[in-house]
């Protein structure tokens, strides 16, 4: 008797042999369980499983593009869930501007979807996720009615270091820039708005302003500029709710086992941090610096021994919304970040206008339904698509995908035998392992 099979099942098998009858299969006997060694993402119309490799020589740049409502975020969610479950990569949701990941810490409660996952020898698994909201004066307190939601702020020094861009100053045009520059190092040491104003007073006291209305006007203008920054509540100087570090403690002893910035602490705890950006994308210059700050911090933290040899993937919805300094930093990741084991999965409606370095360094592009001739032609030119493949893009149904790669997919046939595949392939995205809310529910959130 097989020691791994229950006595009841074994006895039914023996009875079937003796009497020549087929016994009723039990739940754990209904399917042959075939081990999948890669990351499942889609299924072809003839029942083959399409997978990404688990390991890469260089971490990939994966682009998901398609029209509105075609299933881009669904596919991103599918890749994220399985990357998090089946690999040891650290995952960061960098730009959830529609608050879609709000529900991803739930499991599916729909029996039909659960059965679809069972056929893949999978089960519904809530994504371990923690949500972080960039601080601003328009951030609504109601968003914190759920647990595991926190505020992130950028240091005041980040705005000082990038004042030219943030305030849209031109040195040849704005004389105030020179006075600001002289006091920049002092501003970075300030602990409050009062201290900043004191520094401005001191700076202008060193020049003779008596009877000189121009200097008085510049001092007044600089104070107003700084007051606007403080009113916006973007920085750690004014946002006292922001979390600068998180401690991980031993449940039994209460001893602090690890302490670092929130994203690093999430990684060490096996949690996916999600940056919820719906509140800041209308503040374009602040959003640009916020993304820059997060990306620069991750670049520096990669030198720590706990992260140095571990892959880190960024999942970015509507990547074109990251502009300015943030976009420049993303370019650095694409062109210089692979040796540090950084990868990214990005979504966009507008492939034609996205970061050209991402397109030049792409490893995979997943194309969903797209009706724009401009977008289809841009994709076709980059990938050398045939006419029938261009036509296929327009006729794709929701969640159907044309997969393109410069590397390889792994395809599992119906007998569970994997083989590499490098040609374009049409598939339907698999279900995410965690709950994916319809858009109308997300609007209510």
Image (cartoon, helix red, strand yellow):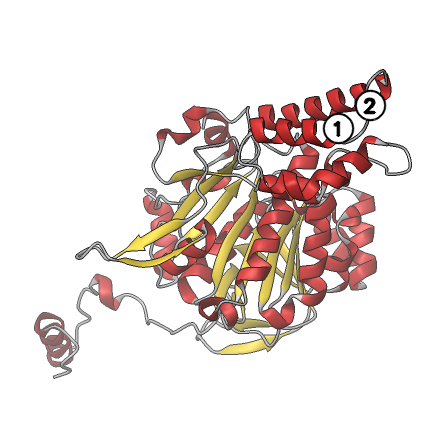
Instruction: Kindly identify the residue that appears in the image at 85 percent across and 15 percent down.
Output: 211
The quadrant where residue 110 appears: top left
Q: Secondary structure at mark 1?
A: helix
Q: Is residue 418 visible?
A: yes
Horizontal side, residue 212 vs residue 110: left or right? right
Residue 347 screen position, x and y as percent:
63, 49
In the rendered view of the protein, which quadrant contains the N terminus?
bottom left
The single residue placed furthest to the right in the displayed view is: 172
Give 287 or 375, whichever is nearer the viewer: 287
The image shows residue 31 at horizontal and vertical percentages of 31, 67
In-front residue for pair 26/183: 183
Give the residue drawn at x 52%, y 49%. 93
Residue 330 higher or lower than 311, as above or below: above
Residue 67 visible within the image: no
233 on left or right of 244:
right
Pointer 1 with pointer 2, Cβ within 8 A: yes
Name the residue beneath numbered marker 1: 204
Dot 1 alpha-carbon crowd within 10 angstroms: few under 14, some 14 to 19, many 20 or more: some
In terms of image quadrants, where is residue 177?
A: top right
Q: Nearer the viewer, residue 389 or 199?
A: 199
Q: Which mark is residue 215?
A: 2
Q: On the picture, is 151 further left or further right than 335?
A: left
Q: Earlier in the sequence, mark 1 or mark 2?
A: 1
x 53%, y 61%: residue: 301
Q: Residues within 10 Å of mark 2 (few under 14, many from 20)?
A: some
State the image coordinates of residue 138 (x, y, percent, origin top left).
Answer: 55, 24
């Amino acid at each position: 008797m097989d020691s791994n099979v229950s006595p009841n099942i074994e006895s039914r098998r023996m009875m079937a042999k003796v009497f020549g009858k087929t016994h009723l299969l039990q739940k754990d006997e209904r399917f042959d369980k075939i081990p999948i060694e890669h990351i499942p993402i889609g299924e072809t119309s003839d029942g083959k499983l399409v997978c990404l490799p688990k390991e890469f020589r260089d971490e990939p740049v994966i682009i998901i593009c398609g029209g509105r409502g075609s299933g881009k975020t669904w596919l991103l969610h599918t890749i994220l869930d399985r990357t998090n479950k089946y690999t040891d990569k650290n995952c960061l949701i960098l730009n959830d501007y529609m608050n879609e990941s709000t529900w991803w810490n739930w499991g599916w409660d729909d029996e039909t979807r659960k059965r679809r996952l069972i056929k893949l020898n999978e089960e519904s698994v809530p994504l371990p996720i923690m949500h972080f909201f960039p601080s601003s004066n328009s951030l609504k307190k109601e968003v914190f009615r759920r647990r595991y939601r926190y505020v992130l702020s950028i240091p005041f020094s980040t705005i000082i270091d990038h004042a030219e861009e943030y305030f849209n100053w031109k040195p040849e045009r704005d004389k105030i820039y020179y006075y600001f520059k002289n006091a920049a190092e002092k501003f970075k040491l300030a602990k409050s708005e009062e201290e900043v104003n004191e520094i401005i007073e001191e700076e202008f006291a060193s020049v003779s302003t008596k009877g000189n209305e121009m200097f008085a006007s510049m001092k007044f203008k600089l104070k107003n500029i700084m007051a606007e920054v403080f009113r916006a509540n973007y920085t750690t100087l004014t946002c006292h709710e922001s979390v600068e570090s998180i401690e991980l403690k031993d449940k039994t002893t209460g001893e602090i086992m690890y302490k670092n910035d929130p994203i690093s602490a999430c990684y060490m705890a096996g949690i996916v941090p999600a940056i919820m950006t719906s509140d800041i994308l209308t503040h374009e210059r602040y959003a640009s610096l916020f993304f820059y700050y997060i990306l620069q911090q991750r670049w520096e933290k990669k030198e720590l021994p706990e992260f140095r040899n571990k892959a880190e993937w960024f999942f970015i919805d509507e990547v074109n919304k990251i502009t300015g300094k943030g976009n420049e930093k993303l370019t650095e990741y694409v062109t210089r970040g692979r040796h540090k084991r950084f990868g990214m999965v990005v979504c966009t409606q507008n492939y034609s206008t996205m970061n050209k370095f991402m397109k030049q360094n792409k490893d995979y592009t997943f194309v969903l339904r797209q009706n724009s001739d401009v977008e289809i032609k841009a994709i076709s030119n980059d990938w050398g698509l045939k006419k029938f493949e261009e036509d296929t893009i327009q006729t794709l149904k929701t969640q159907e995908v044309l997969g393109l790669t410069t590397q390889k997919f792994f395809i599992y046939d119906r007998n569970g035998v994997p083989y590499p595949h490098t040609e374009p392939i049409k598939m339907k995205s698999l279900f995410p392992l965690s709950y994916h809310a319809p858009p109308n529910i997300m609007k209510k959130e």
